[in-house]
């Protein structure tokens, strides 16, 4: 079995690289931008094309495996994680960045068995950085081992977060409440790459002590979650306790100490879970 997952991971790396070439080429083409759950939740034909490219290529090699893909779910497929080997795909994480040529865009592929992520691949294609992790075997960027930061003082920490794609006034209010609390700790900086997957790789790389967001989807965070933990980091729910990748709430930190400190300042809310949605929101 172990060898089987390794060959699946090798395939994920190869197909992510191929997908990255397609994304890179499309970056300066004319892009037809469409919207999904709101006027700021964007999708392009490249998102759809890349997801199909990945799924087709995986199906050829692993015909019994299942898929949860962002654009397939948007098209009405279910988003239920079973015990079966499942590829969890975000074809372009950072579509808004892609649309604006803001240079942080990733292909994110997580692979889960028995509801546990076995490997994660995040290809930051415009930087040509291939982040990989396999359960129990460490996390890497272009083959070099990753290690989270050792910082234990929140006041000397860098925090990453995103504003997400909801503009509902009550959601925006909570987002700003958390941000104000965190800035006033005070932390040394707040950043956001515009992609959950890259933010999590920044935690794994030690550039950022903690990333949190409410509103992510399982395809945004499945691969990154393993990259963070294999680099020595921790995952938690924004209200404390264990993370649930379907809950659309995540804290990824270098340590439990930093995670718990940031959680004290987060004004939590609960968007509809991924696995109860009839379709993408
Ligand atoms: O839709 P894509 O795949 O680009 O992913 C999302 C990001 O990953 C979020 O962190 C981010 O906050 C946004 O919601 C963004 O939509
Ligand atoms: Mg995404
Ligand atoms: Mg996406």
Image (spheres, rainbow, N blue to C red):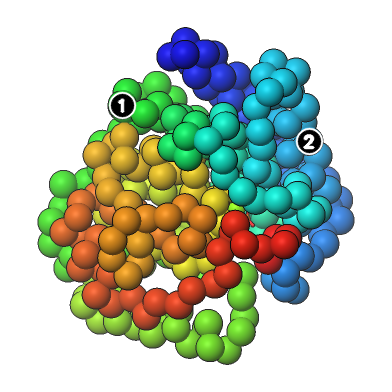
Residue on which the image places disc 1: 136
76 versus 172 height, above or below: above
Q: Residues within 10 Å of mark 2 (few under 14, many from 20)?
A: some
Question: Disc 1 vs disc 2: which is toward the camera?
Answer: 1
Instruction: Find out whether the residues at labels 1 and 2 contact each other: C-beta distance under 8 Å.
Output: no
Q: Residues within 10 Å of mark 1 (few under 14, many from 20)?
A: few
Looking at marks 1 and 2 on the same chain, the residue that comes earlier in the sequence is marked by 2
Q: Position of residue 136 (x, y in %)?
A: 31, 26
Q: Secondary structure at mark 2?
A: helix
Q: CA distance from mark 1 to mark 2?
A: 30 Å
Is 70 positioned to the left or the right of 85 in the image?
A: right
Tell me which residue sits at (20%, 60%) in the image. Answer: 258
Is 141 positioned to the left or the right of 209 in the image?
A: right
Q: Position of residue 71 (x, y in %)?
A: 74, 49
- The image quadrant where one finds the C terminus is bottom right
Tell me which residue sits at (86%, 51%) in the image. Answer: 30
Is 109 positioned to the left or the right of 51 in the image?
A: left
In this orientation, which residue lies closer to the viewer: 135 or 130? 135
Q: Position of residue 247 (x, y in %)?
A: 49, 61
């Amino acid at each position: 079995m172990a060898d089987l997952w390794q060959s699946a991971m090798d395939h994920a790396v190869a197909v992510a690289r191929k997908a990255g070439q397609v994304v890179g080429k499309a970056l300066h083409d004319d892009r037809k931008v469409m919207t999904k759950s709101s006027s700021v939740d964007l999708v392009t034909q490249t998102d759809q094309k890349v997801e199909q490219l990945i799924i087709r290529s995986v199906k050829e090699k692993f015909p019994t495996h299942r898929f949860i893909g962002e654009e397939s779910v948007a098209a009405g497929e279910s988003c239920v994680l079973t015990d079966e080997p499942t590829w969890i795909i975000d074809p372009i994480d950072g579509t808004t960045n892609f649309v604006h040529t803001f240079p942080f865009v990733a292909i994110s592929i997580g692979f889960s068995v028995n509801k546990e992520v076995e490997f994660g691949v995040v290809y930051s294609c415009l930087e040509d950085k291939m982040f990989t992790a396999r359960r129990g075997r460490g996390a890497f960027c272009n083959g070099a081992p990753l290690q989270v930061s050792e910082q234990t003082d929140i006041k000397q920490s860098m925090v990453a977060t995103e504003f997400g794609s909801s503009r509902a006034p009550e959601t925006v209010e909570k987002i700003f409440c958390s941000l104000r609390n965190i800035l006033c700790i005070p932390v040394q900086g707040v950043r956001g790459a515009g992609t959950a997957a890259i933010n999590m790789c920044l935690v794994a790389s030690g550039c950022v002590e903690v990333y949190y967001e409410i509103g992510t989807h399982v395809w945004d965070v499945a691969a990154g979650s393993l990259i963070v933990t294999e680099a020595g980091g921790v995952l938690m729910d924004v209200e404390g306790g264990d993370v649930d990748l379907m809950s659309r709430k995540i804290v990824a930190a270098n340590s439990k100490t930093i995670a718990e400190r940031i959680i004290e300042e987060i004004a939590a809310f609960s968007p509809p879970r991924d696995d109860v949605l009839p379709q993408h929101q």
